[in-house]
């Protein structure tokens, strides 16, 4: 398997994946994660998981974990850039139109588990 880097704002993904993979933990929002991923793509990294992976609307979950190539290339992968730009646009639209729900602590923890589980299975 290709060496990967994980970009996440999910504490569970950070703690459980950090031993096996390089993790760039973002203390911020999903949009902050997407901005960081886009920065990496501009530096030649490629997306290895789709940034909108899951059926959960992007304004509903406070957590997002994205897997990118650890090694960068000398050119920008336009397919990766298109996917991250689409994710940014879609998330901005959902945030503007629907806002962020005020979830209970238990629901927040459930979202951490869902996000981690999706990425952990993608890495298998």
Image (spheres, rainbow, N blue to C red):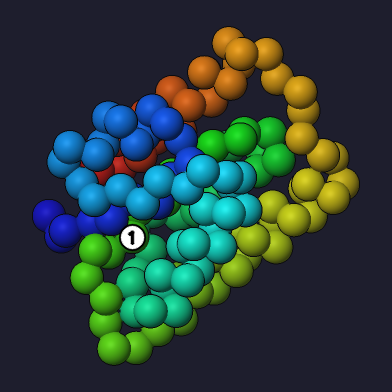
Frontmost residue, 66 versus 33: 33
Q: Is residue 84 visible?
A: yes
Query: Can you say whether 46 is above or below 27 in the image?
Result: below
With 108 as the anchor, is 17 left or right in this view? Answer: left
With 81 as the anchor, is 102 left or right in this view? Answer: right
Q: Residue furthest left?
A: 1
With 55 as the anchor, is 10 left or right in this view? Answer: left
- Residue 46 spot, x, y in % from top left: 35, 69
Work out which quarter of the rendered image holds the C terminus and state it: top left
With 80 as the anchor, is 16 left or right in this view? Answer: left
Q: Secondary structure at mark 1?
A: strand
Q: Residue furthest bottom?
A: 74
Residue at 65% x, 43% y: name it.
Answer: 58
Mark 1 highlights which residue?
A: 68
Disc count in the image?
1
Work out which quarter of the rendered image holds the N terminus and state it: bottom left
- Residue 4 spot, x, y in % from top left: 23, 56
Quadrant position of residue 61: top right
Residue at 68% x, 13% y: name it.
Answer: 104
Q: Is residue 77 visible?
A: no
Residue at 46% x, 62% y: name it.
Answer: 37
Sort mark 1 into few (<14), some (14-19) or many (20+) by Cα contacts within 10 Å: many
Residue at 51% x, 43% y: name it.
Answer: 27
Frontmost residue, 98 versus 7: 7
- Residue 43 spot, x, y in % from top left: 38, 79
Query: Can you say whether 18 is above or below 72 in the image?
Result: above
- Residue 17 spot, x, y in % from top left: 26, 36
């Amino acid at each position: 398997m290709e060496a990967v880097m994980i970009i996440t704002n999910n504490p569970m993904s950070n703690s459980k994946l950090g031993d096996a993979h390089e993790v760039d933990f973002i203390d911020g929002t999903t949009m902050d994660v997407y901005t960081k991923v886009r920065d990496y793509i501009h530096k030649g990294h490629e997306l290895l998981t789709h940034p909108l992976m899951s059926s959960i609307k992007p304004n509903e979950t406070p957590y997002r974990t994205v897997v990118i190539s650890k090694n960068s290339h000398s050119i920008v992968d336009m397919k990766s850039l298109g996917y991250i730009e689409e994710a940014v646009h879609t998330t901005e639209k959902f945030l503007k139109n629907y806002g962020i729900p005020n979830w209970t602590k238990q629901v927040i923890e459930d979202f951490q588990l869902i996000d981690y589980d999706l990425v952990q299975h993608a890495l298998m």
